[in-house]
Image: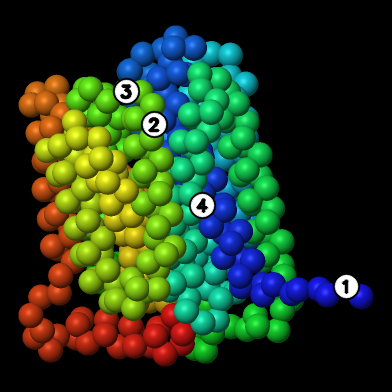
């Protein structure tokens, strides 16, 4: 007699959502910089084309996130389909590209998948997970870490055969998107799938008060994006310039992913913190790690440790953004996630440009120290001011209490 073990639909949703984030972010969007040197050597294009491709990828990511801003509350499953199609087709295009133009267009298209996936998964997790929702959101968002680890391992195993890396990324993305869709259907049919108490259909366009309440989040998101761009864009360059062999620089990329994956282990702890406190701790960790890389890139153990801390801090900080916008307005959490992630990526685009100019002008180490300062300002900017009894402070606290009472 066979015993059938039933896995809760909420667990399947979290697992498949984590896999989709791992694929669209770690294996597709962020793997671009990891395999770029081999692609350039094979297809014969320079830094200018690579830079414009990265810029176009950021722009289309933002377009995808803006689409999610509008559509996630009502059509999250459609967004998952679009995320799987764009990231999967883009990866196939890169794997089969015969020229720099085709490769660049495919890379830009692929980047939209990550922007579409994040807000869709916020909605699906809200629908499927009844208890400890904040932790579930943090775990799903931590999928970037495992994706980076897998991307680094693939690079060690397959490079210089970079086309094989993109084929693996394409298959993984399609499979993960299909798993999310199946999990969402199971959650809808399960008895545990019921609307959270007090949940209402959000307005199509958030009111002015909602945008006003997000002002501080927008500023700190921009600063994290700008400050983190140095490591994401020039991290391998810093290590190579300090004398690290190629294998070690790829291992550092894996260390970034290990740190990101560790967010799932610390999610219960960070989930107990108010979102502002979680942001200050995690963004502060990014600042410290960036400064450490600037000061000791030649010490291999220290550099790898800093990469782990950076990966944890960055991934956990993006989760804190989701928690923060959820505290402000649970019904519009997908819209808030889209807004803040768009600002974060725009900050990365700006930070990458400024860091590039700074590297040429003052050197990589000084540029990284400047990036650490920018990130630290963003971390400090989240700390609450002295309570003055204002309506804004009371409203935030009240919203947070409501979220916790409903099991978030």
Q: Residue at x 33, y 84 (%)?
A: 399
Where disc 3 sits, the SS reads loop
Mark number, residue 2 = 1
Within-10-Å neighbours for mark 3: few <14, some 14–19, many 20+: few
Mark number, residue 250 = 2
* Residue 24 at x, y percent in the picture: 52, 45
Relative depth, front residue between 45 and 33: 33
Find out whether the residues at labels 3 and 1 contact each other: C-beta distance under 8 Å: no
Relative depth, front residue between 218 and 262: 262
Where disc 4 sits, the SS reads helix
* Residue 373 at x, y percent in the picture: 11, 48
Q: Residue at x 25, y 35 (%)?
A: 300
Residue 132 seen in the figure: yes
Q: Is residue 96 left or right of residue 160?
A: right
C-alpha gap between disc 2 and disc 3: 9 Å
* Residue 61 at x, y percent in the picture: 44, 43
Mark number, residue 21 = 4
């Amino acid at each position: 007699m066979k015993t059938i073990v039933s896995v809760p639909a909420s667990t399947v949703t979290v697992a498949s959502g984590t896999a989709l984030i791992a694929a669209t972010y770690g294996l597709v969007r962020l793997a671009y910089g990891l395999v770029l040197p081999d692609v350039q050597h094979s297809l014969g294009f320079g830094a200018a084309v690579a830079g414009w491709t990265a810029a176009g990828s950021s722009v289309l990511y933002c377009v995808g996130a803006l689409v999610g801003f509008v559509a996630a509350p009502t059509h999250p499953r459609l967004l998952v389909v679009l995320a799987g199609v764009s990231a999967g087709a883009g990866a196939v295009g890169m794997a089969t590209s015969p020229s720099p133009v085709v490769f660049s267009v495919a890379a830009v298209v692929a980047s939209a998948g990550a922007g579409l996936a994040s807000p869709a998964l916020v909605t699906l997790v809200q629908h499927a997970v009844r208890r400890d929702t904040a932790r579930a959101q943090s775990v799903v968002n931590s999928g970037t870490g495992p994706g980076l680890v897998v991307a680094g391992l693939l690079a060690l195993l397959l490079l210089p055969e970079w086309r094989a890396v993109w084929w693996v990324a394409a298959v993984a993305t399609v499979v993960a998107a299909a798993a999310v869709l199946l999990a969402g259907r199971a959650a809808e049919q399960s008895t545990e799938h019921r609307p959270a108490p007090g949940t209402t259909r959000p307005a199509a366009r958030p009111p002015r008060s909602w945008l006003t309440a997000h002002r501080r989040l927008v500023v700190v998101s921009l600063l994290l994006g700008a400050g983190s761009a140095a490591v994401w864009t020039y991290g391998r360059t810093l290590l190579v310039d300090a004398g690290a062999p190629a294998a070690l620089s790829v291992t550092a990329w894996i260390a970034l992913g290990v740190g990101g994956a560790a967010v799932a282990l610390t999610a219960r702890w960070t989930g107990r913190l108010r979102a502002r406190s979680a942001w200050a701790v995690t963004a502060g960790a990014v600042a410290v790690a960036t400064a450490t890389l600037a000061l000791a890139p030649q010490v291999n153990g220290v550099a790898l440790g800093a990469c782990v801390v950076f990966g944890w801090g960055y991934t956990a900080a993006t989760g804190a953004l989701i928690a923060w916008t959820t505290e402000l307005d649970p019904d519009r959490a997908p819209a808030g996630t889209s807004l803040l992630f768009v600002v974060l990526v725009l900050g990365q685009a700006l930070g990458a440009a400024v860091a590039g100019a700074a590297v040429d002008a003052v050197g990589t180490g000084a540029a990284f120290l400047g990036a650490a300062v920018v990130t630290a300002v963003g971390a400090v900017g989240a700390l609450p001011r002295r309570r003055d009894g204002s309506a804004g402070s009371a409203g935030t606290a009240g919203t947070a209490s409501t979220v916790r009472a409903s099991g978030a």
